[in-house]
Image: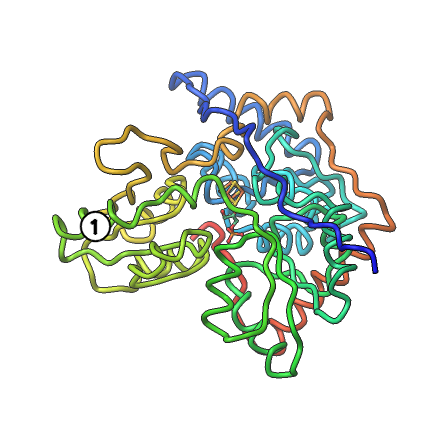
Amino acid sequence: MTAQRLITARPVTDVPPVIEEQLEADERIALKAEITRLMAAQDAILLAHYYTSADLQDLAVATGGCVSDSLEMARFGHAAQARTLIVAGVRFMGETAKILNPEKRVLMPELGAECSLDLSCPADDFAAFCDQHPDRTVVVYANTSAAVKARADWMVTSSIAVPVVKHLAERGEKILWAPDRYLGDYVQKTTGANMILWQGSCVVHEKFKAEGIRDLKREHPEAAVLVHPESPAEVIALADVVGSTTQLINAVRDLAQPTFIVATDNGIFHKMREAAPGKTLLEAPTGGRGATCVSCAHCPWMAMNGLRTLKRVLETGANEIHVDPGIGAQAQRSIKRMLDFAAEQKLAVRGRSGD
Ligand code: 13P
Ligand code: SF4
């Protein structure tokens, strides 16, 4: 008998620094005007993630695009008439948009905008891992490459992972989950499903510290704690609400508390402030007591998107996303399975547009 190769998540050590675009007011106005003109001339719409800059989010809304989670960015683009979709986010979001809209041109301001979850899960290693567990249903998070989605039975987002896995567990299916070990652990505990987990993690969310949140909560006992499930279990354990980006924005709007401690990327504060202008938002700490800022609660790859890079892409046509048609067709099946499930269950997997 031959020994099985041990397949583990690829360590992600090469994390770039967070460098945000700095603009003077007049340059900002000029860039927005020129981008708006170029987008109209090229029949383009802008799909921006909540973690991108306020400038990009505002521009998306002003030009009839959307600001939302990764799934709604793709769905909005699919429903839109525009010939060109500009995806301001990270690479897997551009790929998902292309997979769902193969006939459209998909551009991204920055092709180097990666995601540590995606990087932790190379397609070849993942396929070998799946081959070692042929009895398991393969469920992958949206934060993966097209090739990994093509190997999966289901793709899910954070807003729908629990209901999908619960449904599969009730049918007696055992799950192979990738790539986020924290989200996988949360889903496993919530559903009781039989799951084995790829050991990837988000470099932003895994830095939130339970001790720091407890300290902040002592200073602000009136605050509700909102946590994205890519965070460690001890942070999730402190949460009043665990949810996707859209669900956390809705919690700020809907809950009675005046103050919120928010454990997710701080780009989300822009829409949270719009949704609940009078409320106080506090960033959950990412360093231990006395430590300096580590990830600063902001994704370095999301920060690569800016107005200057967006204008250049529109001027040059650079940074187009291409997905191999065979892989795209295969990956589309795992994404569509989730969309059909959501429609059947009448589950909201939507983000928020300009509201
Ligand atoms: P959502 O698709 O839920 O917005 O999350 C994407 C992401 O990268 C969270 O870190
Ligand atoms: Fe990936 Fe984390 Fe950045 Fe989201 S915040 S894109 S999960 S690295």
| Residue positioned 44% across, 24% down in the render | 20
Q: Is residue 184 above or below residue 328?
A: below
Residue 282 coordinates in the image, percent (x, y): 25, 44
Q: Which residue reaches farthest right?
A: 326
Q: Is residue 271 left or right of residue 352?
A: left
| Residue positioned 50% across, 56% down in the render | 351
Q: Is residue 188 left or right of residue 266?
A: right
Please identify the quarter of the rendering in which residue 10 is found: top right
Q: Is residue 236 above or below residue 201?
A: below
Using the image as rendered, state which of residue 122 and residue 252 is in the foreground.
122
Residue 29 coordinates in the image, percent (x, y): 45, 23
Residue 110 coordinates in the image, percent (x, y): 62, 28
Name the secondary structure under disc 1: loop
Q: Which residue reaches farthest bottom?
A: 171
Mark 1 neighbour density, 10 Å: few (under 14) some (14–19) many (20 or more): few
Using the image as rendered, state which of residue 316 and residue 114 is in the foreground.
114
Using the image as rendered, state which of residue 239 and residue 304 is in the foreground.
239
Q: Is residue 313 above or below residue 108?
A: above
Q: Which residue is mark 1?
A: 278
Q: What colour scheme has been applied to the protein in the rendered image?
A: rainbow
Residue 345 coordinates in the image, percent (x, y): 58, 78
Q: Quadrant of the N terminus?
A: bottom right
Q: Is residue 217 above or below residue 289?
A: below
Q: Is residue 90 left or right of residue 323?
A: left
Please identify the quarter of the rendering in which residue 314 is found: top right
Q: Is residue 10 left or right of residue 217?
A: right
The amino acid on which the numbered mark 1 sits, given as a three-letter code, is: Gly
Using the image as rendered, state which of residue 344 and residue 6 is in the foreground.
6
| Residue positioned 46% across, 69% down in the render | 189
